[in-house]
Image (cartoon, grey):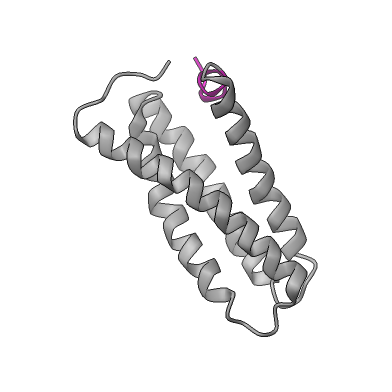
Amino acid sequence: MTFHEAMLSQPYWVVMWTRILGAALVGTLVILAFSKATRRDAFVIFVTHLAVLLIMGWLFKQVGYVRLLGIVHIFLWTPLALYLFARLGDPAIIAPFRQAIWALLLVLMISLTFDYIDVTRYLLGERSSLV
């Protein structure tokens, strides 16, 4: 089973959440690319997202579709969220781009909540496959 197949075997709300998350990441990246003040932020999001995809695929091959996969998000999205939050203080970022950052931060924080719970559950012994 591939990672994509495993993900699609999850409950409908999980599949929809991953689609919302992907759309938020890509959408924010595209929006931020249109402002000189946020182009670097778009690049940071792109590199982080690419790293998540590559490392998540590798970790899936190592351990399968288990709760530990959330650790990739924890290690990469937590610093991304902190970076983006700090960037909100830049007065050069005008309202529409600031709102895009806030929207992505909201989505990341919700996802990270699930990830921190999942990884904690894994470390406490819930190591069975989720498929």
Count of numbered labels shown in the rendering: 0
Up-down: is 11 above or below 89? above
Direction right: furthest residue: 34
Q: Residue at x 72, y 64 (%)?
A: 32
Q: Is residue 102 magenta?
A: no
Q: Main secondary structure of the magenta part?
A: helix
The residue lying toward the viewer, choosing from 55 and 24, is: 24
Q: Residue at x 38, y 23 (%)?
A: 64
Direction bottom: furthest residue: 91
Horizontal and vertical percent position of residue 27: 73, 51
- What span is colored magenta in the figure? 1-8
| Quadrant assignment, res 101 | bottom right
Q: Is residue 48 left or right of residue 61?
A: right
Up-down: is 73 above or below 90? above
In the rendered image, the quadrant that contains the C terminus is top left
Q: Residue at x 51, y 74 (%)?
A: 86
Q: Is residue 86 left or right of residue 116?
A: right
Direction left: furthest residue: 124
Up-down: is 2 above or below 27? above
Q: Is residue 130 left or right of residue 1?
A: left
Horizontal and vertical percent position of residue 102: 62, 62
The residue lying toward the viewer, choosing from 127 and 16, is: 16
Horizontal and vertical percent position of residue 97: 73, 68
Q: Residue at x 36, y 26 (%)?
A: 66
Q: Is residue 3 magenta?
A: yes
Horizontal and vertical percent position of residue 118: 34, 35
